[in-house]
Amino acid sequence: MALSLLRALRTSSNLGRKNTRSLSLIPGQISNHTAKWMQDTSKKSPMELINEVPPIKVEGRIAACEGDINPALGHPIEFICLDLKEPAVCKYCGLRYVQDHHH
């Protein structure tokens, strides 16, 4: 998958203009990096870490998730509907939101 993406990038960058950038990634580096990540079981995966965060309670029916208070560290704003009973999940960062009922 990564190798085909690299080939596509090289092909598209050469169409109709002179290539001013050089892609310095070696295909082996991509697979070696991924293999190292998958073998280290002593650390928690990003999904395990985000699942440890309790669902965030929201007073209204819509949650607005930006991932972080600092826009440089967050993601595009995602408006999430909280009408269902189970927690709603942000598609970018995985944070979960629930509607806080005051009754």
Image (cartoon, rainbow, N blue to C red):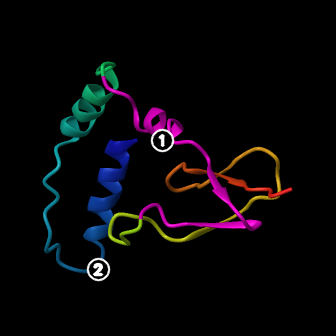
Q: Quadrant of the C terminus?
A: bottom right
Vertical placement of 13 versus 85: above or below? Answer: below
Which residue is found at the position 35% from the left and 57% from the top? 8
| In this rendering, position of residue 47 left or right of residue 42 | right
Q: Amino acid at mark 1?
A: Ile
Dot 1 corresponds to which residue? 50
**Mark 1 vs mark 2, CA separation in Å:** 44 Å
Q: Quadrant of residue 39?
A: top left
In the orientation shown, which residue stands out farthest toward the bottom? 17
The local secondary structure at tag 1 comes to: helix
Which residue type does callout 2 highlight? Answer: Gly
Kind of element beneath mark 2: loop
Instruction: Answer with the quarter of the image where residue 100 lies.
Output: bottom right
Residue at figure coordinates x 17%, y 49% from the top left: 25
Q: Is residue 5 left or right of residue 65?
A: left
Residue at 23% from the left image edge and 80% from the top image edge: 17
Q: Residue 52: x, y in percent?
A: 50, 35
In the picture provided, is 53 more to the left or to the right than 42? Answer: right
Q: Nearer the viewer, mark 1 or mark 2?
A: 1
Q: Residues within 10 Å of mark 1 (few under 14, many from 20)?
A: some
Q: Which residues are magenta?
A: 43-68
Q: Nearer the viewer, residue 2 or 99?
A: 99
Residue extending furthest toward the right: 103
The residue under label 2 is 16
Proximity of marks 1 and 2: CB atoms separated by less than 8 Å: no
As drawn, is 32 to the left or to the right of 12? left
Q: Say if the magenta span includes residue 41.
A: no
Q: Position of residue 89 (x, y in %)?
A: 63, 50
User: Which quadrant does the N terminus fall into?
Assistant: top left
Q: Residues within 10 Å of mark 2 (few under 14, many from 20)?
A: few
